[in-house]
Image (cartoon, helix red, strand yellow):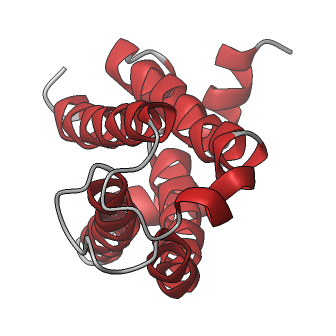
Amino acid sequence: MTLFQICHWLNDTRLATSIRESEVVFPVIEAVHVLAIALLAGTVAIVDLRLLGLILKRERVSLVAGRLLPLTWAGFAVMLASGALLFLAEAAKSCANPVFRLKMLLLLAAGLNPLVFHRTIYRSVAEWDQAPVVPRRARVMALLSLSLWSGIIVAGRAIAYY
Protein backbone atom coordinates (compact mmCIF):
# COMPACT_ATOMS: atom_id res chain seq x y z
CA MET A 1 0.00 0.00 0.00
CA THR A 2 1.42 3.40 -0.97
CA LEU A 3 1.42 6.53 1.19
CA PHE A 4 -1.20 8.04 -1.10
CA GLN A 5 -3.45 4.98 -0.65
CA ILE A 6 -2.99 5.09 3.13
CA CYS A 7 -3.96 8.77 3.14
CA HIS A 8 -7.10 8.02 1.15
CA TRP A 9 -7.97 5.15 3.48
CA LEU A 10 -7.50 7.41 6.55
CA ASN A 11 -9.55 10.11 4.86
CA ASP A 12 -12.45 7.68 4.41
CA THR A 13 -12.61 6.45 8.01
CA ARG A 14 -15.72 7.19 10.04
CA LEU A 15 -13.79 9.42 12.48
CA ALA A 16 -12.22 11.48 9.67
CA THR A 17 -15.57 11.96 7.99
CA SER A 18 -17.22 12.96 11.28
CA ILE A 19 -14.55 15.58 12.00
CA ARG A 20 -14.53 16.93 8.46
CA GLU A 21 -18.30 17.21 8.17
CA SER A 22 -18.95 18.71 11.59
CA GLU A 23 -19.68 22.41 11.69
CA VAL A 24 -18.26 22.59 15.22
CA VAL A 25 -15.65 19.86 15.73
CA PHE A 26 -13.23 20.75 12.93
CA PRO A 27 -13.10 24.48 13.81
CA VAL A 28 -12.64 23.68 17.52
CA ILE A 29 -9.78 21.29 16.78
CA GLU A 30 -8.23 23.89 14.48
CA ALA A 31 -8.49 26.58 17.17
CA VAL A 32 -6.90 24.27 19.75
CA HIS A 33 -4.13 23.49 17.25
CA VAL A 34 -3.40 27.17 16.66
CA LEU A 35 -3.35 27.91 20.42
CA ALA A 36 -1.02 24.95 21.04
CA ILE A 37 1.35 26.18 18.34
CA ALA A 38 1.26 29.62 19.93
CA LEU A 39 2.21 28.12 23.30
CA LEU A 40 4.95 25.97 21.81
CA ALA A 41 6.40 28.61 19.50
CA GLY A 42 6.04 31.32 22.14
CA THR A 43 8.02 29.44 24.78
CA VAL A 44 10.63 28.40 22.22
CA ALA A 45 10.90 32.02 21.07
CA ILE A 46 11.54 33.22 24.64
CA VAL A 47 14.43 30.79 25.03
CA ASP A 48 15.77 31.64 21.58
CA LEU A 49 15.56 35.38 22.24
CA ARG A 50 17.42 34.84 25.54
CA LEU A 51 20.11 32.93 23.65
CA LEU A 52 20.36 35.83 21.21
CA GLY A 53 20.80 38.22 24.15
CA LEU A 54 17.70 40.23 23.25
CA ILE A 55 15.65 39.57 26.39
CA LEU A 56 16.18 38.41 29.98
CA LYS A 57 19.92 39.08 29.79
CA ARG A 58 20.28 38.89 33.58
CA GLU A 59 18.60 35.49 33.80
CA ARG A 60 20.54 32.25 33.47
CA VAL A 61 19.84 30.42 30.21
CA SER A 62 19.32 27.17 32.11
CA LEU A 63 16.76 28.81 34.41
CA VAL A 64 14.76 30.31 31.52
CA ALA A 65 14.85 27.06 29.55
CA GLY A 66 14.06 24.94 32.60
CA ARG A 67 11.02 26.96 33.61
CA LEU A 68 9.56 27.05 30.11
CA LEU A 69 10.22 23.44 29.14
CA PRO A 70 7.04 22.01 30.76
CA LEU A 71 4.92 24.55 28.85
CA THR A 72 6.80 23.79 25.65
CA TRP A 73 6.11 20.07 26.04
CA ALA A 74 2.44 20.73 26.84
CA GLY A 75 2.12 22.84 23.70
CA PHE A 76 3.88 20.15 21.69
CA ALA A 77 1.61 17.36 22.97
CA VAL A 78 -1.60 19.28 22.25
CA MET A 79 -0.26 20.46 18.88
CA LEU A 80 0.62 16.89 17.91
CA ALA A 81 -2.74 15.45 18.95
CA SER A 82 -4.82 18.20 17.35
CA GLY A 83 -2.64 18.19 14.23
CA ALA A 84 -3.12 14.44 13.87
CA LEU A 85 -6.89 14.89 14.02
CA LEU A 86 -6.78 17.72 11.47
CA PHE A 87 -4.62 15.57 9.20
CA LEU A 88 -6.96 12.62 9.61
CA ALA A 89 -9.93 14.76 8.57
CA GLU A 90 -8.18 15.90 5.39
CA ALA A 91 -5.59 13.20 4.82
CA ALA A 92 -6.12 12.81 1.06
CA LYS A 93 -6.05 16.56 0.46
CA SER A 94 -3.03 17.06 2.75
CA CYS A 95 -1.08 14.23 1.17
CA ALA A 96 -1.32 15.93 -2.21
CA ASN A 97 -0.50 19.41 -0.90
CA PRO A 98 3.20 20.39 -1.33
CA VAL A 99 2.85 23.12 1.32
CA PHE A 100 1.71 20.49 3.84
CA ARG A 101 4.74 18.37 2.97
CA LEU A 102 6.98 21.42 3.40
CA LYS A 103 5.45 22.03 6.83
CA MET A 104 6.17 18.42 7.81
CA LEU A 105 9.81 18.76 6.70
CA LEU A 106 10.15 21.99 8.67
CA LEU A 107 8.62 20.27 11.72
CA LEU A 108 11.17 17.49 11.42
CA ALA A 109 14.00 20.02 11.23
CA ALA A 110 12.52 22.01 14.13
CA GLY A 111 12.42 18.80 16.18
CA LEU A 112 16.02 17.90 15.35
CA ASN A 113 17.29 21.41 16.18
CA PRO A 114 16.86 21.17 19.99
CA LEU A 115 18.13 17.60 19.94
CA VAL A 116 21.36 18.74 18.30
CA PHE A 117 21.50 21.83 20.52
CA HIS A 118 21.17 19.85 23.76
CA ARG A 119 23.60 17.11 22.68
CA THR A 120 26.29 19.59 21.64
CA ILE A 121 26.31 23.26 22.62
CA TYR A 122 24.10 23.04 25.71
CA ARG A 123 26.40 20.47 27.34
CA SER A 124 28.75 23.33 28.22
CA VAL A 125 25.98 25.65 29.46
CA ALA A 126 27.62 25.94 32.90
CA GLU A 127 30.45 27.90 31.27
CA TRP A 128 28.17 30.50 29.65
CA ASP A 129 24.90 30.17 31.56
CA GLN A 130 24.95 33.70 32.98
CA ALA A 131 26.62 35.46 30.05
CA PRO A 132 24.50 38.17 28.42
CA VAL A 133 26.01 37.05 25.09
CA VAL A 134 26.18 33.29 24.63
CA PRO A 135 28.54 31.42 22.26
CA ARG A 136 28.08 32.00 18.55
CA ARG A 137 26.94 28.43 17.89
CA ALA A 138 24.12 28.82 20.42
CA ARG A 139 23.02 32.05 18.74
CA VAL A 140 23.07 30.39 15.32
CA MET A 141 20.91 27.54 16.65
CA ALA A 142 18.50 30.10 18.15
CA LEU A 143 18.21 31.92 14.81
CA LEU A 144 17.64 28.60 13.06
CA SER A 145 14.95 27.70 15.58
CA LEU A 146 13.14 31.02 15.16
CA SER A 147 13.34 30.67 11.38
CA LEU A 148 12.02 27.10 11.40
CA TRP A 149 9.08 27.88 13.67
CA SER A 150 8.24 30.96 11.62
CA GLY A 151 8.31 28.81 8.49
CA ILE A 152 6.08 26.20 10.12
CA ILE A 153 3.51 28.81 11.08
CA VAL A 154 3.54 30.43 7.61
CA ALA A 155 3.33 27.04 5.89
CA GLY A 156 0.50 25.99 8.18
CA ARG A 157 -1.52 29.04 7.21
CA ALA A 158 -0.65 28.59 3.52
CA ILE A 159 -1.94 25.00 3.45
CA ALA A 160 -5.52 26.25 3.25
CA TYR A 161 -4.75 28.49 0.27
CA TYR A 162 -2.86 26.04 -1.92
Residue 93 visible in the picture: no
Q: From the viewer's perspective, tell me whether residue 138 is left or right of residue 33.
A: right
The residue at 57%/84% (across/down) is: 70
Q: Quadrant of residue 93?
A: top left
Q: From the viewer's perspective, tell me whether residue 126 is left or right of residue 58.
A: right
The residue at 60%/71% (across/down) is: 77
Q: Nearer the viewer, residue 159 or 71?
A: 71
Percent position of residue 26, x then y: 33, 66
Q: Quadrant of residue 34?
A: bottom left
The residue at 23%/71% (across/down) is: 23
| Tag count | 0
- Image vertical order of residue 106 relative to residue 68, above or below: above
Quarter of the picture holding the C terminus: top left
The residue at 53%/58% (across/down) is: 128
Q: Nearer the viewer, residue 66 or 138?
A: 138
Percent position of residue 32, x then y: 34, 75
Q: From the viewer's perspective, tell me whether residue 61 is left or right of residue 154.
A: right
Q: Quadrant of residue 97?
A: top left
- Image vertical order of residue 41 relative to residue 144, above or below: below
Q: Nearer the viewer, residue 15 or 32?
A: 32
Percent position of residue 130, x then y: 45, 71
Percent position of residue 149, x then y: 34, 43
- Image vertical order of residue 116 relative to residue 98, above or below: below
- Image vertical order of residue 134 relative to residue 98, above or below: below
Quarter of the picture holding the N terminus: top right
